[in-house]
Amino acid sequence: MRGLVGRLAAVGADEAVIFTSFHQSPLPMALLLRMAGVPRVAAISDDYPGSLLDVRHRVPPGVPEPERALSLAAAAGYGLPADEEPTLHLRPEAVPPSPVGPPGYVVLHPGSSVPSRACPPEVAVGIGRALVDAGHRVVVTGTPAERELTAAVAGAGGVDLGGRTGLAELAGVIADAAAVVVGNTGPAHLAAAVGTPVVSLFAPTVPFGQWAPYRVPTVRLGDPTAPCRDTRAATCPVPGHPCLAGIQPADVVAALRLLGVTPDRATAGVAVTASGGSAR
């Protein structure tokens, strides 16, 4: 804590805006910022903050997280310009060209840092196989720790990029995809930021209305009424992971059709240098 206070003081900031999720308190960080001498602090807080906050913003339950954050920025005096849409987006220079060939492939991201939100491996393998069989070019992404998983999922004919992309490179891969098949994890929101449609394999541990990919075409799959609903559990509390284990690979293929993503059998499971046919 002393080290962090020292780092914050060294910044010499005139103001701090603390962004939290709906279930997190900003007050511990506000205390450290006060100790570091930051003169103005803004945050969303249901708990009475005393003198810790200069701007105490309140937001009703259920508001999508991006809107929640934007409303705090506006309350602190930093609203969007009148001509700017409230969407997630990245600066174009932050998105490098995709390293896997022409646009039109489907990105399948099977893992998650939170186990309760990850698709069961056997389901992910089945989805990868079904997408290739349907004629889609499939690119499988994941972290270095997920290389075994991505190799298994890509084994039916996909391109395995597990552990081979940093955040910027992953943004480039997703930006050129026709769609992304992913759970409630970072790449879903990265897809929203670059405008790529999402097939959301969504575990209901947190509300879909708050955590869905924001303002991008999305088809949700999974059981929204599973017993894990709204538990915020990091590890699945129900044997068998029923909220996602029941997803059928054919449902993912059908979801892509709903998003207007059509396969190109000429490129199914082979080189990514061939032409891909798809529509967003």
Image (cartoon, rainbow, N blue to C red):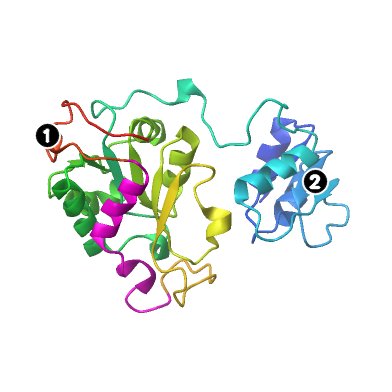
- What residue is drawn where x is 77% and y is 52%? 31
Q: Secondary structure at mark 1?
A: helix
Q: Residue at x 41, y 61 (%)?
A: 117
Residue 8, position as x, y percentages in the image? 69, 38
Where is residue 168 shown, x and y percent of the image?
Answer: 41, 31
| Left or right of residue 9: residue 190 | left
**Which residue corresponds to mark 2?**
34
Residue 9 screen position, x and y as percent:
73, 36
Picture residue at 54% right of the left edge, 42% below the top: 215
Can the viewer see residue 133?
yes
- What residue did someone put label 1 on? 266
Residue 142 visible in this rendered orientation of the protein: no
Secondary structure under badge 2?
A: helix
User: Residue 39 falls in which quadrant of the image?
Assistant: top right
Queried whether the magenta region covers residue 236, the answer comes back as no
Q: Is residue 113 positioned above or below 180 on the image? A: below
Cβ–Cβ under 8 Å for marks 2 and 1: no
Pick the quarter of the image with the C terminus: top left
Residue 171 or residue 197, whichever sits in front:
197
Range covered by the magenta-colored residues:
237-260
Q: Residues within 10 Å of mark 2 (few under 14, many from 20)?
A: some
At label 2, which amino acid type do we have? Arg
